[in-house]
Amino acid sequence: MFNAPSAPGGAVIRSFGEYQPARVVTNHDLAQRVDTDDEWIRSRVGIEERRVAGPDDSVESMAVAAGGKALAAGGLSPEDIDLVIVATCTSQDQIPNSAATVAARLGIPAPGAFDVNAACAGFCYALNLASDSVRAGSSRNVLVVGSEKLSDWVDWEDRATCVIFADGAGAAVVSADQDQGIGPVVWGSSGERADTIYLRENRYLYQEGQAVFRWTTTELYKVALQALERAGVDPTEITAFVPHQANLRIVESIARKLGAPQALVARDIVTAGNTSSASVPLAISRLIGRGELRSGSTVLTLGFGAGLVYAAQVIRIP
């Protein structure tokens, strides 16, 4: 039971699901295309390989695959879902939204459906919206999906970005419960620095790497500690820390400052790359699948990305 503002009821995460494209792109593969090599990539971002979408993969199809697994893992039918939220910043079309399409393909009848664009913090934002909706009594069960096809927005001739980004989806089902398994969110933005991550030529992802690195490694551990405090959880009590998988150096720098040496630290970035809003649920789902996270585990999540926006909260693993 986490601390939470007064509300009619509680909210818990019932299940997770994931999807990764079949195509694996190694550092050696990229070295055949741009001026880079395995040592350069590993030393700067910690990535060994990443998944890249195939011709049949889209933001919506990957969300459907991950969402379907989450529904099955939670023992729910499509009729049980009242609301679908898709976090994405890489949809090819602004209209229609992805969530309604995803819901229809999953056979969910007439749910509320909307997208959230908080870049790499999108899933954490959407998870809190789902929790609030359930706790307020507006929904019984909410499907939350982070799905990204970043390969559509990467300049594959730019070695600074093409080595980082990848594709995939992660999903969770949030359900009403007498207990509270989702802690209060600590979220915010640093909009005066929004120009550090943007679309170059309105087509290609670009970031001021050093500026982003300084911001994440000097400011965001404070946000994570605030989320622990609001949830009434001491750093020594968490089972795992799952931040956005932006860069292995960033992940490990923030983790060192938490005062939680016992915590498992997600390093999904090494084999999955940076999948933006999909990275947090994808990493959690993979940890569960490998048996590294068990039911009842307490996990600190932290999302952050373009905007610059951030969100952190403590959750309990179903």
Image (tube, helix red, strand yellow):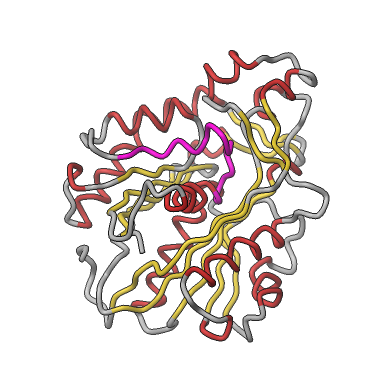
Q: Is residue 44 left or right of residue 290?
A: right
- Res 254 quadrant in image: top left
As displayed, is residue 276 above or below residue 72?
Answer: above
* Residue 187 highlighted magenta (yes or no): no
Q: Nearer the viewer, residue 268 or 114?
A: 268
Q: Is residue 315 left or right of residue 280?
A: left
As displayed, is residue 172 above or below residue 141?
Answer: above
For the point 45% across and 58% down, which residue is it? 125
- Res 231 quadrant in image: bottom left
Q: Nearer the viewer, residue 248 or 116?
A: 248
Horizontal and vertical percent for residue 118?
53, 53
Q: Which quadrant, please, contains the C terminus?
A: bottom left
Q: Is residue 55 left or right of residue 247?
A: right
Q: Which quadrant, please, contains the N terminus?
A: bottom left
Q: Residue furthest front?
A: 291
Q: Which residues are magenta?
A: 264-278
For the point 46% across and 72% down, which residue is it? 74
For the point 26% across and 79% down, which residue is it? 178
For the point 28% across and 54% down, which residue is it? 298
Horizontal and vertical percent for residue 177?
31, 78
Horizontal and vertical percent for residue 247?
50, 30
